[in-house]
Image (spheres, rainbow, N blue to C red):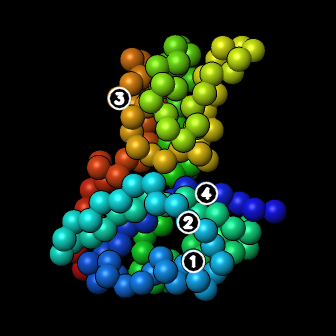
Amino acid sequence: MELSTNILLVFRQDVMYQPVIYRLAREFDLLFNILEAKILPRREGRLILELRGTPDAVARGIAYLEDSGVEVTSIADNISRDEERCVHCGACTAVCRTGALALDPTTLEVLFLPEKCAACGQCETACPTQALSGVNIERLGPLPRR
């Protein structure tokens, strides 16, 4: 069985130039897809990554990242939709590039699959009722200096 999860990684300056992602793929037999990246020179790096492999390999890979000094946040745990605000207009589905938001052809309601979300923030911008919120690579504050 294969697991796919989207995670936000924040690399402190002292970790940013280490071959952490290379080792993640090579030593843990994981596939990865970079969904978004931002490098702040001499400060930190941010990476939204789709990680795919067996559940055990994904868990070991995430533990390795954390042990290496990388801050790991699950995207699915930080994205939410306010069901009372959502009017199922579908505006968010037009901008969702990962399929995390889609119209159910039977009910015409917007389906939300947070595990597919890449935290690009486009749905938040498109939503006229501001029903969606969560992690966005641009809105994260910098890590405290150590």
**Which tag, 4 or 3, sits closer to the chain's start?**
4
Picture layout, residue 37 above or below residue 139: below
Dot 1 or dot 3: first in sequence order is 1
SS assignment at label 1: helix
Q: Image quarter for residue 102?
A: top right
| Residue labelled with disc 2 | 32
Residue in the picture at 35% in, 29% down: 125
* Quadrant in which the C terminus is drawn: bottom left
Quarter assignment of residue 59: bottom right
Q: Label 1 to label 3, Cα distance in Å?
A: 34 Å
The kind of residue on which mark 4 rests is: Thr
Q: Is 74 left, or right, of 39 in this rendering? A: right
Distance (Cα) linking label 4 and label 1 = 15 Å
Q: Which mark is residue 3?
A: none
**Closer mark to the observer between disc 4 and disc 1:** 1
Q: Is residue 8 visible?
A: no
Per the rendering, the mark at residue 5 is 4
Kindly tell me whether residue 105 is visible in this rendering: yes
| Badge 1 amino acid | Ala
Q: Quick one: label 2, few (<14), some, or many (20+) residues within 10 Å?
A: some
At a point 69% along the width and 67% down the height, the residue shown is: 53
Position in image of residue 115 (x %, y %) = 61, 47
What residue does disc 3 label? 125
Residue 124 percent coordinates (x, y): 39, 31
Going by the picture, which residue comes out furthest to the left?
42
**Considering the numbered disc 2 on the image, is that residue within a helix, a strand or a loop?**
strand
Residue 25: mark in rendering: 1
Q: Is residue 54 above or below residue 111?
A: below
How would you rate the neighbour count of disc 1 (Cα within 10 Å): few for under 14, some for 14-19, many for 20 or more? some
Amino acid type at image mark 3:
Thr
